[in-house]
Image: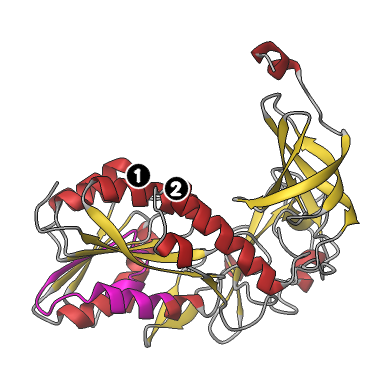
Amino acid sequence: MTRSAERTLDWTDRVLDLEVGPVAHGGHCVARHEGRVLFVRHALPGERVRAVVTEDQGGSFCLADTISVLDASPDRVPAPCPWARAGGCGGCDFQHVAPPAQRALKTAVLREQLTRLGGLTGGLAGTVEVEELPGGPLGWRQRLRLAVDDEGRAGLRAHHSHEVVPISDCLLAPAGLLEDLLERHWRPGDELEVAVDALGERHLGAGVPPAERSASVQHAAGRDWELSPGAFWQVHPELADTLVEIVGEWAAAPAGGTAWDLYGGVGLFAAVLAGQVGPEGSVSVVESARQAVADGERALRDLPQVSFRSGRVERVITELPDPDVVVADPPRKGLGRTMVEELCARAPERIVYVACDPAALGRDVKLFAAQGYALTALRSFDAFPMTHHMESVALFHPVSAERP
């Protein structure tokens, strides 16, 4: 296909019968038609489906959504939510997939990203499994954001769209959490923040009158955390303590040592690191959100070895003493070349990396390898059932005592 043909090609709204291939990162499966790649939602590997093209920029690929299944996979199940369909809510990618098969699809994506982007062959890239968390596939979501359409109705956004899909419930949220909010009239264009605390009580943040906003209390790492409205916290109720356990085990910060908790939020991991380094050590939490820093300082005021620094991580760490251990929980884009090089140049004994995107993790694995740090342990969790998302924890060690 010539470049001029690519620019003018547009299959939008075209209906195609497709043989579905492997799963791809992002909640799609791959199909091919007339020399082009289609990323198809609501399909499964091995199926034959009828799909409509939903987005086409005229290049070598386009996006499509399944509108009927001609030959179904044995892993296909009825979606429990009526809005998990073509043209419906964009939040859930895998409601049509049996939960064990969802984890198998995520495992395949994780392994592929580690191999293709991370440059790994065998070892962890071939053995890691996405693990189930307790609680089941529905009712787990403790924090979500509702969008408001032009008529003032709250709902969820369609896939790859600003369009708001009006709903009467979200099955990922605890039962009854949204009922009255979905019945109210809101200011068009607003977004509503909704959270559930450790006691199952609802708290509202942005998008509601100030009088309706309230702080929430979560419990993890053996302590309570009072969070300001809109503050970040893991959305799965089992994830925070799961991460705390693994990060603590792998960090193993030495008594009297120095630890960094980067992109540290309210200092969840710092609470564990503080117990490891003890009163003679130090833990520096670096976080750009000032309100999170304030919440963290309040929660950890009994740990004088913990200090919070507010600002961009890449700037603040230049002012910190070299660490024995680094814990990093960066945003979805990952660490990137500059940050990986800076961390490795400071020569920590180990780096524990919490990753919410397997592609970013794969890219950073390769960057760490180039700086002489090898991936030595990896676990991944299905912390977002019914979606394509997962959470991973990776451990890096220097290959030798010599810095590259």
Q: Residue at 19% across / 75% down in the picture? A: 253
Q: State the residue position of label 1.
A: 336
Q: Left or right: 129 with respect to 60?
A: left
The reply to whether discs 1 and 2 touch (Cβ–Cβ < 8 Å) is yes
Q: State the residue position of label 2.
A: 333
Q: Would you place residue 245 above or below residue 396 in this image?
A: below
x, y percentage for residue 346? 14, 53
Which residue lies most toward the top here? 4
Q: Which portion, as a residue range, is magenta?
A: 243-270
Q: Would you place residue 391 above or below residue 304 in this image?
A: above
| Quadrant hosting residue 183 | bottom right
Along the viewing direction, whichever of 246 and 50 lies nearer the viewer: 50
x, y percentage for residue 391? 49, 65
| Residue 332 in view in this figure | no
Q: Would you place residue 359 above or below residue 395 in this image?
A: above
x, y percentage for residue 182? 78, 65
Circle 1 residues within 10 Å: few <14, some 14–19, many ≥20: some
| Quadrant hosting residue 132 | bottom right
Q: CA distance from mark 1 to mark 2?
A: 8 Å
Which residue type does callout 2 highlight? Lys
Circle 2 residues within 10 Å: few <14, some 14–19, many ≥20: some
x, y percentage for residue 159? 72, 48
Along the viewing direction, whichever of 301 and 381 lies nearer the viewer: 381
